Image (spheres, grey):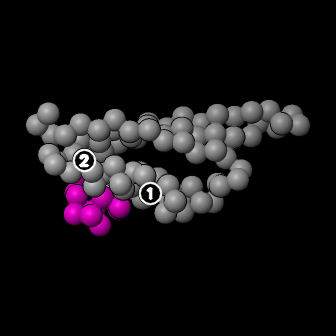
Amino acid sequence: MLGTLNGALEVRGIRLDPDAIRAEVEGTNELRDGLPLLTRIDVRYFLRIPPGSRETVERALARHRDKCPTAASLKGAVEVTWAAEIVESGS
């Protein structure tokens, strides 16, 4: 999902340095019929964005999961959630 988000930002003219975009991801497994199954993935983005680009970044965030091949592959089997901490550079 991070790659999809980064690509969505680049298409919108926002290029972030590698140290300005990162994600922490946590998966949740549940036992079902004795098998540990991945049931949930929580993604937390950390973005340092150019001043004045917040609205564009928030629109990209709102749509990126729907355009992500990985999220689409997991749909219906694994719940995927995301949150973002956004800081404008210079803030």
Which secondary structure, mark 2? helix
Q: Amino acid at mark 1?
A: Arg
Q: Quadrant of the image for the C terminus?
A: top left
Which secondary structure, mark 1? helix
- Where on the picture, by quarter, is residue 9? bottom left
According to the image, label 1 marks what residue? 63
Q: Spatial distance from mark 1 to mark 2, Cα to Cα?
A: 14 Å
Residue neighbourhood size for the residue with mark 1, other residues' Cα within 10 Å, grouped as few (<14), some (14–19), many (≥20): few
- Residue 6 is inside the magenta segment: no
Where does the image place residue 84, in percent across and percent down from the top left?
Answer: 38, 39
Q: Can you see residue 53?
A: yes
The residue lying at 28 percent from left, 55 percent from top is 56
According to the image, label 2 marks what residue? 54
The residue lying at 22 percent from left, 57 percent from top is 15
- Would residue 35 appear left or right of 1 to someone viewing this image? right
Q: Which residues are magenta?
A: 7-16
Up-down relation of residue 63 to residue 34 (above or below): below
Up-down relation of residue 5 to residue 23 (above or below): below
The residue lying at 36 percent from left, 56 percent from top is 60
